[in-house]
Amino acid sequence: MDALVKQMNALCDALPFQTSWYLKDLKSGRTANRLGDVPVPSASTRKISILMAALKAVHDGKLALDQKVTIEARYQDNDSGTFQHMTPGFWITFRDALVQMIIVSDNTCTGTVVDLVGLGNVQGFCESVGMTRTIHRFGIPPRLGPDHTLDQVTTTTPNDQGMLLEMILRGASDKAAAATLGSTAELCRLALDILSWQKLKTRLPSQLPLGTKVAHKTGTGSRGFMDAGIVYKDGEPLFILTAYTEHVPAELPDGTPGFAAAYQLIGRMSRLCWDALG
């Protein structure tokens, strides 16, 4: 682990933007982080906790996975996912809204889900499970430039997201662990399934063997790029890695687009973990 941490930090140090991360080796139980408790914009990694707050509402009987959800025009003023382009007025199930929110980061569905669950309930869920540095501020994010302040966006930390992912993983096989999330083992398994159906694969999975199972959620903000997930090998969870880049320039001195450098960094760190821990 010590050698791996040095390699990961060396990759981060070589680039002209801030990178923070959290890592847990699920075989040995060892953890490491870089700026793991420093708040950063969450971008769409916030949707993992929205998903779990929604499943808690299902467990509590306040919402149902099979209930009809109408897609309304008022939620379509956003720039993420596919439903922004659809003719409003059609319906899908609540379960399908959760799936779309995660696998293509659909913000029409996200805004709808947050309103159904309640923004205060999403925040309350985070506080109840110990995500003390995660603050949800909206359903659909405002359009902001890279000079925004942290208190204008939803914020989180690599450690908070890593902790939540481990809680979901434990909850999938342990009723008591699921109960700490206000959920059930079955609902935790559903959450992992949905996260593993992720279609946006240019970060954590990008340098892993084709077909590697990764239960994760990406994020794209106006000044950074993120990914948080559980990487599996031979059907078993191998490690948890959450990675956040901040203040990424549009272009690096060598001409590389900033987003490409961030994607490559996250993919490379994931591959280092795969090779060292597998």
Image (cartoon, grey):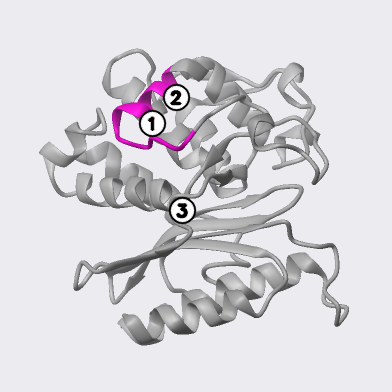
| Magenta-drawn stretch contains 125 | yes
User: Residue beneath label 3, please?
Assistant: 158
Q: Are the residues at dot 1 and dot 2 in contact (C-beta closer than 8 Å)?
A: yes
Mark 1, residue position? 126
Mark 1 residue element = helix
Q: In which quarter of the image is the N terminus?
A: bottom left
Residue 102: which numbered mark, if any?
none
Residue ID for mark 2: 123
Amino acid residing under circle 3: Pro
Badges 1 and 3: C-beta atoms under 8 Å apart? no
Image quadrant of residue 2?
A: bottom left
Quarter placement of the C terminus: bottom left
* Residue situated in front as seen by the camera: 26 or 5: 5
Residue 70's x, y, as percent?
61, 18
- Which amino acid type is shown beneath numbered disc 1? Cys
First-in-chain label (1 vs 3):
1
